[in-house]
Image (cartoon, rainbow, N blue to C red):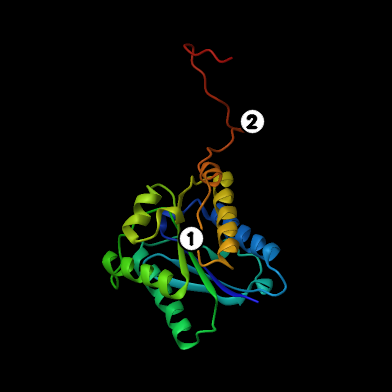
Amino acid sequence: MTIQEVIAVIDRSGSMKGKEKDTVGGINTVISELKNSKSQEDTINFSIKLFNNEQIMKLRSLEISEVGDFSVSDFIPSGSTALLDAIGDTLTFFIQKKVMNPQAYDSCVIYIASDGLENSSIKYNRKYIKEIISNAENIYNIKVFYLGANQDAILEAENLGIPMEQAINYLENELSTQAVYTSVARVVSESRNSFNSVSFTPAERQASIQPPLLTRSQPVQQTEYSTLY
């Protein structure tokens, strides 16, 4: 029997406007995949934290079988991006939980999704975040994954102290967002019984940056100078 904590730390700053449906769909993809991958002997406690310049806990350590679908009405973008504060507070809470009760969990996965860069944290700096992420993984078996859009997610993860293998870029469209969250569910499941590093695969990285499909309502524009075959 294993106990796993899974925490979704999701950017809801103003730049996420217009992306509510895809983001919520991605969160629900992870919930569904974790329910399907869970064995009867395992316990998966799921948390959802939304952040901008403030933090809101929508779920805290609720057993995955009891988690319902997340709603678009619960995801209202506004404000700025206090990324470091969201990471620091989340890590501090789950490190303290393990210190107070060594049997609280066997593994913990925190995945962060953001479409912008840090711009408003007041409690933590990058040096401290790098240190706490390193200690969290090496001492407490807490793995941190980073999902980044509109940025170089690998570089940003490196600046935060997150291993590049645990970072992934994605495009903000329905197909790519669903693909990246499906990948998250896989690495979460793989981390459940492993103290080794877990990485996104090349195929997952490719799927997460696929452009949106053209539909009949999105015709390819032509000019008198173009010839399409």
Q: Which residue is the extreme one toward the right?
A: 40
What quarter of the picture does the C terminus occupy? Answer: top right
| Frontmost residue, 122 versus 133 | 133
Query: Image check: 15 left or right of 76?
Result: left
Mark 2 and mark 1 in contact? Answer it, CB < 8 Å.
Answer: no
Q: Is residue 24 visible?
A: no
Marks 2 and 1 sit apart, C-alpha to C-alpha, by 43 Å
- Helix, strand or loop at disc 2? loop
Query: Image check: 178 left or right of 157?
Result: right
Q: Position of residue 70 (x, y in %)?
A: 61, 65
Q: Position of residue 102 (x, y in %)?
A: 50, 84
Residue at coordinates 41% horizontally, 60% vertically from top-left? Answer: 13
Q: Quadrant of residue 156?
A: bottom left
Q: Quadrant of residue 157?
A: bottom left
Residue at coordinates 40% horizontally, 77% vertically from top-left? Answer: 92
Q: Which residue is mark 2?
A: 216
Circle 2 Cα neighbour tier, 10 Å, few/some/many (<14 / 14–19 / ≥20): few
What quarter of the picture does the N terminus occupy? Answer: bottom right
Q: Which amino acid is tagged 1?
A: Ser
| Frontmost residue, 198 versus 16 | 198
From the viewer's perspective, is residue 163 above or below residue 130? above
Q: Which residue is mark 1?
A: 197
Q: Position of residue 142 (x, y in %)?
A: 47, 70
Circle 1 Cα neighbour tier, 10 Å, few/some/many (<14 / 14–19 / ≥20): few
From the viewer's perspective, is residue 98 above or below residue 172? below
Q: Which amino acid is tagged 2?
A: Arg
Q: Nearer the viewer, mark 2 or mark 1?
A: 1
From the viewer's perspective, is residue 163 above or below residue 63? above
Residue 180 circle label: none
From the viewer's perspective, is residue 177 above or below residue 10? above
